[in-house]
Image: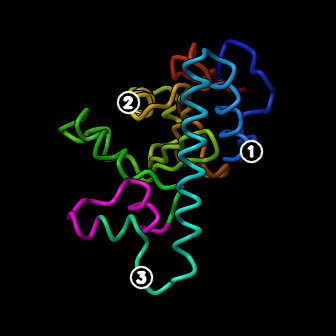
Amino acid sequence: MTKSPARHARGRHARPPSEFTVRLHRMTASLAGSRRRRAAAAGTLTAAAAVLAAAALALPGGSHPAPRAAVAARTGAAPSPHERVAAAGDPDEITDAVPYFETKDPGKKVVKHVTDVRRSGSFVRVYTDLGESDENSEPAIDLCKWTTQFLKDGGDDEPRVFVHGKSDDNGSVVLANKQSDKDDCGVSETP
């Protein structure tokens, strides 16, 4: 656990905030910043409105492909990561994480333990086949640090990570976590 008190004491296994709440928090935090941030937010909102308007205009026809798909088909451009996720089905699954971990662990000594990487609200959860006794183990800490760096490289300013292991009676236990910028990925001993 963290050594600093949480902004909202939620408990170790609390349900994370909704995606809408997370996005709203990020948007209001960015608006509270400098003029440049406000200008960027205004530009983003304007661009989003333009995209929504274009999408609304494309709906009545129905028989022709969406404008972005048509352009991609003509240019041979690859679909965006969001389009790939939508095509794959599960929007919470993070498929790019394991290949990133493999660049950090070419021998796959740590990566072989990863069974799933998912987004859960504002958190990313890495599920492993490690046991409950592997709390604060080197593989769990490495996965936590690698996931944090993966999120930072992807533009996440406040990465929150949980590395889970299997337990005989408790589902998925937390082996390592990063709940704030001051966290070092270690969890405190539980009684």
As for residue 77 lying within the magenta part, the answer is: yes
Q: Tags 1 and 3 in contact by the CB under 8 Å rule?
A: no
Mark 1, residue position: 15
| Most common secondary structure along the magenta stretch | helix
Residue most toward the bottom? 63
The span from disc 2 to disc 3 (Cα, nearest Å) is 37 Å
Q: 50 or 184: which is nearer to us?
A: 50
The span from disc 1 to disc 2 (Cα, nearest Å) is 26 Å
Q: Is residue 115 above or below residue 133?
A: below
Q: Is residue 92 toward the left or the right of residue 71 in the image?
A: right
Q: Is residue 34 toward the left or the right of residue 98 in the image?
A: right
Residue at horizontal 24 percent and vertical 42 percent from the top: 108
- State the count of labels: 3
**Label placed on residue 153:** 2
Q: Provide the secondary structure element on which disc 1 rests.
A: loop
Q: 35 or 114: which is nearer to us?
A: 35
